[in-house]
Amino acid sequence: QVQVVESGGGLVQAGDSLRLSCAASGRTFSPSAKGWFRQVPGREREFVAAINWRGGRTAYADSVKGRFTISRDVTKNTVYLQMNSLKPEDTALYYCAWAITIDLPTADKEYNYWGQGTQVTVSS
């Protein structure tokens, strides 16, 4: 059993930066990709960013391109999301997810393991 755990969320002001981290405990393995999603109450979960675990290719939602950067540390089996120039509309519960077969998934149904989420709140 794999437990995916996010950390790094918090309350910041518009224009500030945060870095989210995602690690795993339990029975771990190398995934095909890891990704970040976010969700606000009453809305569907939306894709934020993904990274292919072997080659490092990345994908981003248009809303975060140029502001967010996803990266990985394969030695620690950890993925990061550096969020710069944060906006109030970035406020959400951010989820980390692991995929085990698809190289660079951008849909939540393509992921196999999920964390509980970490809250990011950006005040104006």
Image (cartoon, rainbow, N blue to C red):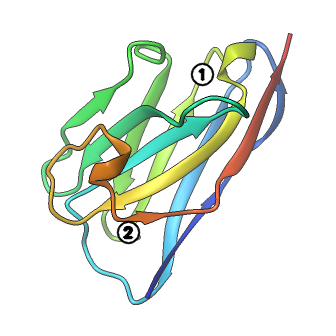
Considering only vertical position in the picture, is 26 above or below 43?
below
Q: Is residue 106 left or right of residue 13?
A: left
Q: Position of residue 29 (x, y in %)?
A: 28, 80
Res. 87 in view: no
Q: Is residue 3 left or right of residue 86?
A: left
Crowding near the residue tagged with mark 1, few <14, some 14–19, many ≥20 C-alpha atoms within 10 Å: some
Q: Is residue 36 left or right of residue 60?
A: right
The part of the image, by quadrant, that contains residue 21 is bottom right
> Under tag 2, what secondary structure?
loop
Residue at 43% x, 88% y: name it. Answer: 1
How far across and down, in percent of the image, does residue 32 sit? 19, 60
Which quadrant of the structure image shows residue 123? Answer: top right
In this view, the residue in front, 38 or 79, is: 38
Residue 104 can be seen in this image = yes
- Residue position marked by numbered label 2 in the rendering: 77
Instruction: Please tell me which residue is depicted at 75% across the width and 15% down the height of the picture.
Output: 88
Q: Residue at x 15, y 54 (%)?
A: 102
Q: Amino acid at mark 1?
A: Asn
Q: In the rendered structure, are the residues bearing label 2 and label 1 in contact, judged by CB atoms less than 8 Å apart? A: no
Q: Secondary structure at mark 1?
A: loop
Q: Residue at x 75, y 44 (%)?
A: 119
Where residue 26 sits in the image (x, y, percent)? Answer: 48, 89
Q: Is residue 68 above or below residue 8?
A: above
The quadrant in which the C terminus is found is top right
Q: Earlier in the sequence, mark 2 or mark 1?
A: 2
Disc tally is 2
| Residue 16: image location, x then y, percent | 74, 20
Q: What is the spatial separation of the Cα atoms under label 2 and label 1, in whole angstroms? A: 23 Å
Kind of residue at disc 2:
Asn
Residue 33's tag is none
Label at residue 84 = 1
